[in-house]
Amino acid sequence: MLYTTKKTEGYAEIMPIYEYKCDECEHKIEVRQGFYDEPCVTCPACGKDALRKLFSTFTPIYKGPGFHTTESRGITGRKRKPNIKVGLKADLPQEEQERMS
């Protein structure tokens, strides 16, 4: 299901596009319908009442701050806290202590 904008009477209305497939002749159609419209049942190609609604997958695209995909890449412009390790220097292995000195 996709969405399209239908302009009526000076305002924009978002209308979903539904996909249908005929079980008899395998004909596929796309219909722009409102959420509360009755589903299509009659195939325009063969005339039989064998249409069924198809369900499609989609990949959302997250834009803007607050989403993991944008936050993890650091594209929102926010300053990140550096990775700070808390503890005593004496707790580290000898090589790490020497490297920090």
Image (tube, grey):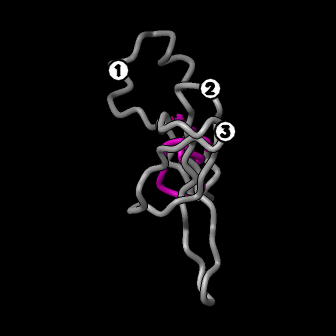
Residue identifier under label 1? 90
Most prominent secondary structure in the magenta stretch?
Answer: loop
**69 in magenta:** yes
Residue 101, percent from left and from top: 55, 25
- Outermost bottom residue: 10
Residue identifier under label 3? 45
> Which residue shows up at 41% across the image and 32% down it?
85
* Along the viewing direction, whichever of 70 and 101 lies nearer the viewer: 70
Say which of marks 1 and 2 sits in front. Answer: 2
**2 in magenta:** no
The answer to the question of whether label 2 and label 3 lie on touching residues, with beta carbons closer than 8 A, is: yes
Label 2 vs 3, first from the N-terminus: 2
Q: Which mark is residue 25?
A: 2
Asked whether, in this view, residue 6 is left or right of residue 85, the answer is: right
Asked whether, in this view, residue 65 is left or right of residue 4, the answer is: left
Asked whether, in this view, residue 14 is left or right of residue 27, the answer is: left
> Which residue shows up at 64% across the image and 51% down it?
75
Residue 25, percent from left and from top: 62, 26
Residue 84 appears in view: yes
* Along the viewing direction, whichever of 4 and 21 lies nearer the viewer: 21
Label 1 vs 3, first from the N-terminus: 3
Tell me which amino acid carries mark 2.
Cys
The answer to the question of whether label 1 and label 2 lie on touching residues, with beta carbons closer than 8 A, is: no
Disc 1/disc 3 C-alpha distance (Å): 80 Å
> Which residue shows up at 39% across the image and 17% down it?
92
Classify 70 as above or below 25.
below
Mark 1 closeness class: few <14, some 14–19, many ≥20 residues within 10 Å: few
In terms of secondary structure, where does tag 3 sit?
Answer: loop
In terms of secondary structure, where does tag 1 sit?
Answer: helix
- Outermost front residue: 47
